[in-house]
């Protein structure tokens, strides 16, 4: 519209000049005649131009960054943002959740936009941990391309296979980026070997000929450069991410979308704002949307498409760099956020009111593990938290299930809720968030979700990749044999003398709680990665994977005098001064049976003092359980008491006589 505005200004200037006494009448009439003709022509040209011409999908590239955990996705995103001029306030800028920064892992998928050579790139950062695979599944349908990041030293691992399978299923043609090539142990021969392993992985997953012809780049995300040829120290003028960005423009196709069709968008992310309410994020499948447009929400039901709500677009937003910018309109192929609706959520369709069919929903893998959340009914309940009732716990869980499709919540009896997910880490993150929000609750041990086909009991099997020192191989193999693991491959780690790599398959139930045991057996030097593989025939009862526990039979403050006599009985979980109650677990017994003990017993006092009579109590530091360790440790007849200030282990039935009347604790 700049042309008509400029000519309108010229027309006004000519009219004012006509009234000037010094102006030549003939000259001004000629000037105004020409201006009128130009003004009319410009208006006609502007009217002929389509209003969607500025929303060209050909300028868009939608790309997901996928990889195994710790292979450098988030660091790569930082470098790409800086390359395109974004202001990064700190490292790992895409990890906006407090738990992500504390633990150094990506938990939720995020999307951002960057500009490169007159193109707009929508980049999606995804988690690499197997427990958060649902985050990968729900966003991979929004993009037309993917960057598969693989550690050049470690090569493809279990989660690499999972995320690649999802990308290939949606027809994406990934770009292979071999990261960390600047490390001393990485050579060109090693990169060629890893490239061959990735090619074999593509082939085993059924990749097409076009997908097998993937481009390969070499990078050091930490140093901030990428190269199309192998190098450890590129020249200063190309020591940046420009070659990777150019490869995205060349190899990732623009979205195939029609601007003339009615507006439709599938919601794939949702967040809540105090002022704007629900903010729905997704990829525009077709059409154009503008601020003020009337839209409605649709969802697919067993009986067909159901209308959820009618509303109006109040705000249109788009992520740019690390911030959000307001826009007036957006077209097909773009990834945007909409405010103005109160009921649609993830998996629903937002569309023009003339649209009556919803877009296909996202297909997610089923959950493999479940835990029961309930009200904290211990004698110490209500001291720390502010949200104590079953109603508040249920409302919080339902809100979580609405924004996280990988979690299912099923109400149970007596204000309990069965929460189904992918693994104990995913559910542990949910519990940790709840306790930080002031919730008190009791949590059951995780249970594996079995299937039955043709009368055969099936259980989830996971693929496990382990890297340990040679002296720890025996301990690891013995522990995993009790957990019904089967070794698929075993060999030395390339470039690491004295290290052994194991590839195994193991039931999910056998891996619950094994991570802390693995860290102890390998003295913290081992690496273990796991990912869901398939459902398989039940492998039978597990071996003896845990000993009995020391159970308190007193109420009050634990004394050092009592712990001194209990220490030879096993490993203590609590220090002196801790509040305890009847049925609370205070340690692990040295034998396979549970033992009831009195940890509040005080030393008898007398008025006689003598040199050397008093004992100097020295206790071994207790084993303080973290939330993830507690989830993997508790048995089927036990619970975890979670409060904002404490994590306690307890028996399901606190009374010792009632526990004795119940059946013995199962082996798994």
Image (spheres, helix red, strand yellow):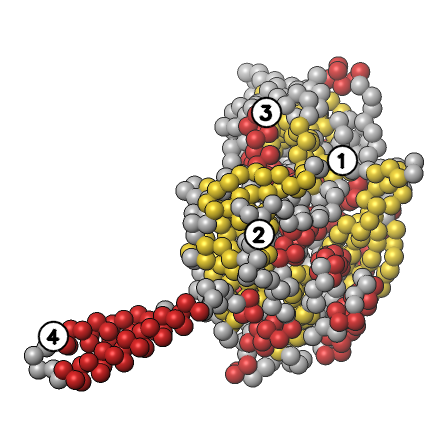
Which of the 4 image quarters holds residue 195?
bottom right
Mark whose residue sits in front, 4 or 3: 4
Question: Could you tell me residue 457's position as x and y percent?
Answer: 88, 38
Precedes in sequence: disc 4 or disc 2: 4
Q: Are marks 1 and 3 in contact (CB under 8 Å)?
A: no
Residue 190 can be seen, yes or no: no
**SS category of the residue bearing label 4:** loop
Task: Find numbered disc 1 in the image and state the secondary structure of the residue it sits on.
Answer: strand
Whichever of callouts 4 and 3 sits on the residue coming sooner in the sequence is: 4
Q: Residue at x 24, y 75 (%)?
A: 10
Residue that mark 1 sits on: 447
Q: CA distance from mark 1 to mark 3?
A: 21 Å
SS class, disc 2: strand
Label 2 belongs to which residue? Answer: 265
Q: Which residue is mark 4?
A: 19
**Residue drawn 55% across the image and 76% down it:** 242
The residue to which callout 3 is attached is: 390
Q: CA distance from mark 1 to mark 4?
A: 90 Å
Q: In the rendering, at what x and y percent does residue 423 appear?
A: 71, 43
- Distance, label 4 to label 3, CA atoms, is 82 Å
* Rendered position, 336 above or below 634: below
Corner quadrant of residue 377? top right
Q: Which of 519/463 is in front?
A: 463
Q: Position of residue 169 (x, y in %)?
A: 74, 59
| Mark 1 vs 3, N-terminal side | 3
Tell me the mark number nearer the camera, choosing from 1 and 2.
2
């Amino acid at each position: 519209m700049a042309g008509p505005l400029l000519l309108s200004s010229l027309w006004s200037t000519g009219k004012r000049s006509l009234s000037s006494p010094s102006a030549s009448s003939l000259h001004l009439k000629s000037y105004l005649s020409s201006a009128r003709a130009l003004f009319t022509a410009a208006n006609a040209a502007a009217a002929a131009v389509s209003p969607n011409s500025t929303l060209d999908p050909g300028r868009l590239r939608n790309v997901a960054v996928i990889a195994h955990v710790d292979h450098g996705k988030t660091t790569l995103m930082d470098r790409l943002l800086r390359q395109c001029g974004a202001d990064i306030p700190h490292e790992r800028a895409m990890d906006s959740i407090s738990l992500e920064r504390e633990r150094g892992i990506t938990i939720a998928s995020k999307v951002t936009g960057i500009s490169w050579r007159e193109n707009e790139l929508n980049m999606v950062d995804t988690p690499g941990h197997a427990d958060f695979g649902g985050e990968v599944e729900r966003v991979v349908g929004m993009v037309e391309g993917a960057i598969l990041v693989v550690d050049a030293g470690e090569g493809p691992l279990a989660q690499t296979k999972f995320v690649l399978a999802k990308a290939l299923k949606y027809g994406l043609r990934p770009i292979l980026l071999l990261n960390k090539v600047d490390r001393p142990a990485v050579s060109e021969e090693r990169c060629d070997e890893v490239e061959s392993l990735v090619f074999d992985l593509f082939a085993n997953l059924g990749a097409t000929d076009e997908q097998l012809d993937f481009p390969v780049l070499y990078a050091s995300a930490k140093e901030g450069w990428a190269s199309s040829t192998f190098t450890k120290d590129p020249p200063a003028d190309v020591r940046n991410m420009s070659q990777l960005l150019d490869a995205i423009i060349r190899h990732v196709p623009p979205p195939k979308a029609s601007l003339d069709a009615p507006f439709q968008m599938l919601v794939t992310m949702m967040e809540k704002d105090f002022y704007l309410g629900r903010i729905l994020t997704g990829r525009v499948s077709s059409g154009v949307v503008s601020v003020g447009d009337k839209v409605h929400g649709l969802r697919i039901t067993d009986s067909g498409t159901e209308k959820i709500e009618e509303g109006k677009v109040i705000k249109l937003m788009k992520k740019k760099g690390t911030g959000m910018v307001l826009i007036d309109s957006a077209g097909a192929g773009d990834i945007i956020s909409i405010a103005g609706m109160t009921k649609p959520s993830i998996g629903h369709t937002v569309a023009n009111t003339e649209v009556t069919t919803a877009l296909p929903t996202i297909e997610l893998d089923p959950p493999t593990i479940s835990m029961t959340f309930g009200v904290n009914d211990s004698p110490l309940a209500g001291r720390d938290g502010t949200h104590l009732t079953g109603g508040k716990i249920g409302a919080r869980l339902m809100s979580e299930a609405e924004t996280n499709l990988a979690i299912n919540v099923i109400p149970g009896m007596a204000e309990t809720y069965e929460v189904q997910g992918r693994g104990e880490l995913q559910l542990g993150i949910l519990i940790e968030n709840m306790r930080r929000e002031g919730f008190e609750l009791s949590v059951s041990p995780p249970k594996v979700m079995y299937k039955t086909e043709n009368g055969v009991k099936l259980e989830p099997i996971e693929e496990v990749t382990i890297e340990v020192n040679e002296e720890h191989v025996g301990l690891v193999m013995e522990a995993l044999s009790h957990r019904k693991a089967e070794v698929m491959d075993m060999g030395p780690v390339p470039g690491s003398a004295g290290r052994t790599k194991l590839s195994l398959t193991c039931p999910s139930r056998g891996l619950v709680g094994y991570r802390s045991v693995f860290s102890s057996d390998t003295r913290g030097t081992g690496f273990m990665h796991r990912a869901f593989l398939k459902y398989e025939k039940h492998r039978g009862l597990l071996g003896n994977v845990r000993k009995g526990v020391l159970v308190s039979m007193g109420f009050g403050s634990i004394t050092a005098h009592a712990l001194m006599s209990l220490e030879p009985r096993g490993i203590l979980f609590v220090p002196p001064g801790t509040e305890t109650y009847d049925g609370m677990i205070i340690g692990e017994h040295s034998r396979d049976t549970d033992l009831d003990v009195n940890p509040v017993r005080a030393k008898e006092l007398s008025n006689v003092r003598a040199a050397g009579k008093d004992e100097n109590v020295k206790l071994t530091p207790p084993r303080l359980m973290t939330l993830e360790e507690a989830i993997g440790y508790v048995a089927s007849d036990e619970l975890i008491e979670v409060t904002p200030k404490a994590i306690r282990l307890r028996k399901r039935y606190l009374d010792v006589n009632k526990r004795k009347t119940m059946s013995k604790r199962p082996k798994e």
